[in-house]
């Protein structure tokens, strides 16, 4: 195991509005709200869902491939420099890197779906 699933992040045009929907639907509470990024947690305080503002958002149209679902996984790791070679060996591709061992880095899985490795300091 390289890391643990931290949170599922969903792209959207208005994180606060969508957070209200999921708060009511799932009984979650906001724990982080930067205006562009909202994290919702379960009653035990564990982050469950993050909503991320994306400029020029285009909603998915099920099941049209031209308008695919837009979300990514955040995988919590203690050190990016240790985790990176392991995910690259599994077939991931680095999309947006950082030269620091903390924070986050964006990768694509072997078929192009984005995911992030994140450290506790980036939360």
Image: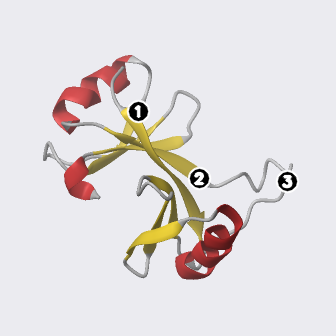
Dot 1, crowdedness within 10 Å: few (<14), some or many (≥20)? some
In front here: 59 or 5? 5
Q: How is the image coloured?
A: secondary structure
Q: Which residue is located at x 58 percent, y 73 percent? A: 19
Task: Reply above or below: 51 against 119.
Answer: below
Q: Tag 3 or tag 2, which sits nearer the N-term?
A: 3
Q: Nearer the viewer, mark 1 or mark 3?
A: 3
Quarter of the picture containing the C terminus is: bottom left
- Residue 85 position in % (x across, y down): 26, 24
Look at the image and tell me whether residue 52 can be seen: no
Callout 2 touching callout 1 (CB < 8 Å): no
Secondary structure found at label 2: strand
Q: Residue furthest front?
A: 44
Relative height, residue 48 to residue 109 (above, below): below
The circle on residue 62 is: 3
* Whole-number angstrom distance, CA of label 2 to CA of label 1: 17 Å
- Whether residue 65 can be seen here: yes
Provide residue 6's location: percent of width, then percent of height.
41, 45
**Which of the two discs, 2 and 1, labels the residue nearer the N terminus?**
2
- Residue at image position (35%, 17%) is 89
Residue 79 picture quarter = top left
Judged left or right of residue 77, residue 41 is: right
Is 31 displayed left or right of 100 in the figure?
right
Mark 2 crowd level (few <14, some 14–19, many ≥20, 10 Å Cα)? some
Local packing at callout 3 (Cα closer than 10 Å; few below 14, some 14-19, many 20+) is: few
The quadrant of the image that shows the N terminus is: top left
Q: Circle 2 sits on which residue?
A: 71
Residue in the picture at 50% in, 32% down: 109
Disc ID at residue 93: 1
Label 1: which secondary element: strand
Image spot of residue 99 (x, y percent): 14, 46
């Amino acid at each position: 195991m390289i890391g643990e699933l931290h949170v599922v992040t969903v792209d959207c045009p208005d994180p606060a509005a969508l957070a209200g929907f999921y708060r009511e639907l799932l009984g979650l509470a906001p724990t982080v709200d930067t205006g562009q990024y909202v994290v919702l947690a379960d009653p035990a305080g564990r982050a469950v869902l993050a909503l991320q503002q994306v400029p020029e958002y285009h909603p998915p149209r099920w099941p049209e491939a031209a308008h695919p679902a837009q979300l990514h996984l955040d995988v919590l790791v203690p050190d990016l420099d240790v985790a990176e070679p392991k995910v690259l060996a599994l077939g991931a591709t680095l999309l947006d890197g950082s030269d620091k061992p903390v924070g986050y880095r964006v990768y694509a899985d072997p078929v192009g779906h984005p995911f992030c490795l994140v450290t506790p300091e980036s939360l």
